[in-house]
Image (spheres, helix red, strand yellow):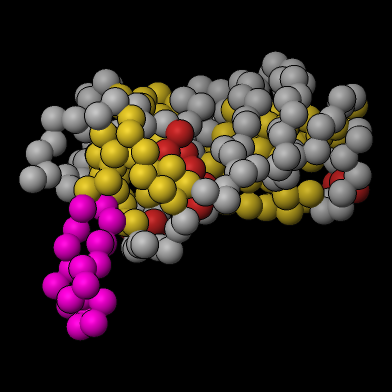
């Protein structure tokens, strides 16, 4: 079985104007949350869609829109056939402690199979700070996320694009990887050595992204007996549609 994500009507809104949310951004025009799938693997995308059928809009990498062999079964959800993936235990979205600059980074830790559980302590000298701006227009990017890769430690850029990321004393990995991201921009991963602390990176440039965005549906290419022998004339069945107003008959 090869489910495929499709965007029947791609969205023309500028994602840079969205209000940042935990999963992406809120579109004032559509009054909906647009989920940012760009940093997820294909399996994480399927897992999120199956667990969150109330979401209907997303921003994807172009490779997400190809057919992929993913184990799943069909289940009923409010009258809509939805994806239910098997064998994806332990996959979850990154949890971001989003905190504006000049305020302490959130220290709350939750249990997760993806990240080590820390009871962190912080020293003022183990800090990375700077300002995130757009590469094309040199404008600040408020709401950008700054995440310590592999840990539930992060910060959020303030209205001037400025941020301060405190690195827990318990993290001795060298180098550490910091992920800078914002919907509408390509994510940037940068390595820093702890011998550089305290570190002022001054300006971090994010490049505009050409990802695709819009309301999504999930299609399943279903083979008939004739197709199994001849490999032609695919019959497509809509197994999940986020918008109940769509007619796919």
Could you say where residue 135 lies in the image, as x and y percent from the top left?
Answer: 46, 49
Q: Let me know if residue 232 is in the magenta part.
A: yes
Residue 195 x/y as whole percent: 90, 48
Magenta-drawn segment: 219-237
Q: Is residue 209 magenta?
A: no
Residue 144 or residue 137, whichever sits in front: 144
Choose top left, top right, bottom left or bottom right for residue 183.
top left
Where residue 130 sits in the image (x, y, percent)? Answer: 66, 36
Q: Residue at x 41, y 48 (%)?
A: 73
| Residue sitting farthest toward the top | 103
Residue at the spot 25% in from the left edge and 62% down from the top edge = 222
- In front here: 30 or 209? 30
Depicted 246 relative to depicted 226: above or below: above
Quadrant containing the N terminus in the rendered view: bottom left
Q: Is residue 208 visible?
A: no
Residue closest to the eye, 4 or 192? 4
In the rendered image, residue 62, in percent from the top left (x then y), is placed at 35, 59
Q: Which quadrant does the C terminus fall into?
A: top left
Residue furthest out toward the bottom? 230
Horizontal relation, residue 110 to residue 79: left or right: right
Say whether residue 68 is visible: yes
Q: Is residue 236 left or right of residue 167?
A: left
Q: In which quadrant of the rendered view does residue 233 lie?
A: bottom left
The residue at 86%/52% (across/down) is 174
Residue at position x 51%, y 22% from top?
A: 159
């Amino acid at each position: 079985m090869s489910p495929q994500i499709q965007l029947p009507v791609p969205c023309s809104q500028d994602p840079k104007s969205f209000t940042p949310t935990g999963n992406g951004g809120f579109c004032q025009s559509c009054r909906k949350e647009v989920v940012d799938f760009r940093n997820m693997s294909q399996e994480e995308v399927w897992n999120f869609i199956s667990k969150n059928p109330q979401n209907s809009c997303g921003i994807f990498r172009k490779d997400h829109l190809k057919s992929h062999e993913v184990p799943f079964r069909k289940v009923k959800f409010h009258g809509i056939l939805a994806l239910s993936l098997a064998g994806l235990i332990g996959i979850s979205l990154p949890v971001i402690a989003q905190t504006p600059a000049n305020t302490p980074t959130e220290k709350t830790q939750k249990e997760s199979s993806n990240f080590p559980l820390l009871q962190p302590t912080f020293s003022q000298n183990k800090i990375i700070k700077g300002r995130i701006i757009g590469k094309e227009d040199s404008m600040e990017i408020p709401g950008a996320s700054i995440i310590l890769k592999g840990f539930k430690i992060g910060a959020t850029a303030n209205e001037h694009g400025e941020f301060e990321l405190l690195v827990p004393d318990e993290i001795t990995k060298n180098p550490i990887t910091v992920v800078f991201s914002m919907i509408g921009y390509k994510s940037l991963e940068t390595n820093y050595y702890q011998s550089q602390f305290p570190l002022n990176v001054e300006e971090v440039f994010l490049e505009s992204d050409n990802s695709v965005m819009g309301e999504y549906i999930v299609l399943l290419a279903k083979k008939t007996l004739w197709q199994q022998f001849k490999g032609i004339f695919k019959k497509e069945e809509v197994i999940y549609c986020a918008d109940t107003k769509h007619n796919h008959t």
